[in-house]
Amino acid sequence: MSDLKKFEEAFTRHIAGDLYNAATETRKQSAVAMAERDILSQTGPDTDKEDPVYIDAVAEQTIFLLLNIDKLYSPLDDVVSESVEGAGSVTYDRAPARIMSARAVQLCCLLTKKTLPLCRG
């Protein structure tokens, strides 16, 4: 795992950096470690971990994980619908939770292909 210090500047520049700063030290370490594994799973083990784009990608994914922790591990993933006799029923959206920040994915593309993906729509 990388030293958290090298990510500090990226978090101070991030629009949601206060979320990272408000987290406990244990939560910060866990989120950065998970984010690093997520980014390396997209870019490969030979990625230059000192590249500023890598650092920004990890910071972006870290913030994404902190923002979405409840959605990523929701117990409702297995529940499709429920009903109570006489009260009605409810159906849940079973769309799978996104596990990667869209911005982090773009930064991963920049790391691996040295170009940003073209998105139309």
Image (cartoon, rainbow, N blue to C red):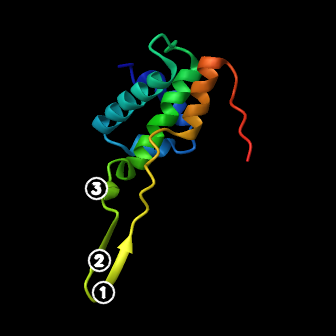
Residue type at the position of mark 3: Pro
The residue located at (39%, 45%) in the rendering is 22
Residue type at the position of mark 1: Ala
Residue 71, x across and y down, in percent: 39, 52
* Residue carrying label 2: 83
* Residue carrying label 3: 75
Residue type at the position of mark 2: Ser
Tell me where residue 52 sits by quadrant.
top right
Q: Are marks 2 and 3 in contact (CB under 8 Å)?
A: no
In the image, taking residue 85 as reference, residue 38 lies left or right, namely right
Residue 117 or residue 59, whichever sits in front: 117
Query: Can you see residue 80?
Result: yes
Q: CA distance from mark 2 to mark 1?
A: 8 Å
Q: CA distance from mark 3 to mark 1?
A: 23 Å
Q: Which mark is residue 87?
A: 1
Dot 1: what SS? loop
The residue located at (59%, 37%) in the rendering is 103
Q: Are marks 2 and 1 in contact (CB under 8 Å)?
A: yes
